[in-house]
């Protein structure tokens, strides 16, 4: 990241100022990754042992730290240095460390570390390591191509000008904040599908997924309606004027519909992961990403359409994920053979 990313940005970002800002931000932001990795592993442990209610403690601590340090470091409040854009990077690093540290304390406090001997008997175990890589490898590549697709999208958006980029950044926050609920239900689907299969109740999987999807979509639909009724309130939170609101509202309407679609798709995709078929999950994601990137390129670079059309790629992406995941679960192929 430190050496390769600047080369990629220089070749792809047209604005020198944006290029400098992005590189400065990234060189700070990347130091949060070790904390994030450990934090996510501990979260996965709590989900896997059906103690997901404890996740709220780490999430709350991370959110509070992020909001506080965003405000103080970006604007220089409470005697903190005024760092602007880079302040958000420092805030993210601090927030991820805070979340990791709090979850560490929770695991110690609840006796989970002692129950599973988490800090004892460190030794290389080849069979277990190979098994972990077989299951996690496809998921790692799945996340990687997902991040690359977002990077590709924003590179093309940057070519459309500063206003389009600013509007798109506010749209990202729709998925960043309201999408948290979708991914919470998706994680629940992953865990509960695995649990039900482990109990030998494979026939109950389909009905379980539908119930979780219904709840997730209902929550997202509420947010969708509110954001469409009061778009000016949403944009006002970013300190934007009437002109920005007028240009951003059509995009917001597209994104909120995509948010509802993601509520269903994320649940079904994670249900596939819950069956242990991580390679299938990877290929589903890969297919959706290819469709997404081709569509975005044609819309922005070939047809030169508005960013509302560009953001409709989210609809296409989530519908592709949903269709393929639904078909796989419905087919019953996951019931046959060992998990891969």
Image: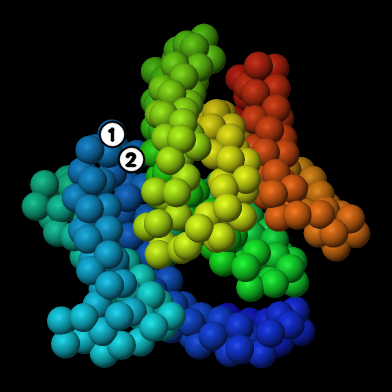
Residue at image mark 2: 47
| Left-right relation of 134 to 227 | right
Q: Nearer the viewer, residue 3 or 51?
A: 3
Secondary-structure class at tag 1: loop
Residue 63: x, y in percent? 27, 58
Location of the C terminus (image quadrant):
top right
From the viewer's perspective, is residue 144 above or below residue 7? above
| Left-right relation of 233 to 7 | left
Residue 20: x, y in percent? 58, 89
Label 2 neighbour load within 10 Å: few <14, some 14-19, many 20+ = some
| Left-right relation of 45 to 169 | left
- Residue drawn at point x = 70 percent, y = 44 percent: 312
Label 1 neighbour load within 10 Å: few <14, some 14-19, many 20+ = some
From the viewer's perspective, is residue 103 above or below residue 74? above
- Residue drawn at point x = 23 percent, y = 69 percent: 68
- Residue drawn at point x = 74 percent, y = 48 percent: 309
- Residue drawn at point x = 43 percent, y = 23 percent: 218
* Quarter of the view holding residue 115: top left
Residue at image mark 1: 50
Q: Looking at the image, do the residues carrying marks 2 and 1 touch, with CB atoms under 8 Å apart?
A: yes
């Amino acid at each position: 990241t430190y050496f390769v990313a600047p080369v990629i940005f220089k070749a792809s970002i047209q604005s020198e100022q944006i290029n400098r800002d992005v590189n400065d931000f990234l060189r700070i932001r990347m130091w949060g990754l070790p904390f994030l990795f450990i934090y996510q592993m501990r979260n996965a442990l709590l989900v896997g042992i059906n103690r997901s209610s404890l996740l709220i403690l780490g999430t709350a601590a991370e959110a509070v730290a992020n909001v506080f340090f965003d405000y103080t470091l970006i604007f220089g409040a409470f005697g903190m240095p005024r760092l602007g854009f880079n302040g958000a990077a420092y805030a993210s690093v601090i927030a991820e460390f805070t979340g990791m540290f709090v979850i560490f304390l929770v695991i110690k406090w609840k006796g989970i570390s002692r129950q599973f001997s988490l800090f004892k008997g460190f030794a290389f175990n080849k069979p277990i390591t190979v098994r972990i890589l077989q299951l996690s490898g496809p998921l790692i590549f799945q996340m990687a191509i997902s991040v690359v697709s977002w990077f590709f999208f924003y590179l093309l958006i940057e070519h459309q000008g500063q206003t389009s980029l600013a509007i798109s950044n506010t749209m990202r926050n729709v998925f960043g904040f309201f999408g948290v609920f979708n991914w919470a239900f998706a994680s629940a689907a992953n865990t509960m599908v695995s649990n039900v299969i482990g109990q030998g109740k494979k026939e109950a999987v389909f009905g379980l997924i539908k119930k979780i999807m219904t709840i997730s979509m209902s929550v997202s639909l509420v947010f969708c309606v509110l954001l469409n009724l009061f778009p000016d309130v949403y944009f006002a939170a970013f300190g934007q004027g009437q002109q920005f609101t007028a240009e951003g509202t059509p995009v917001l309407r597209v994104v909120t519909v995509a948010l509802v679609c993601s509520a269903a798709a994320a649940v079904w995709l994670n249900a596939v992961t819950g069956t242990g078929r991580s390679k299938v999950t990877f290929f589903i994601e890969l297919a959706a990403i290819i469709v997404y990137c081709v569509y975005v390129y044609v819309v922005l670079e070939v047809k030169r359409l508005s960013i509302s059309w560009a953001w409709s790629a989210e609809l296409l992406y989530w519908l592709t994920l949903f269709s393929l995941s639904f078909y796989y679960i419905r087919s019953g192929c996951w019931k046959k053979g060992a998990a891969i």
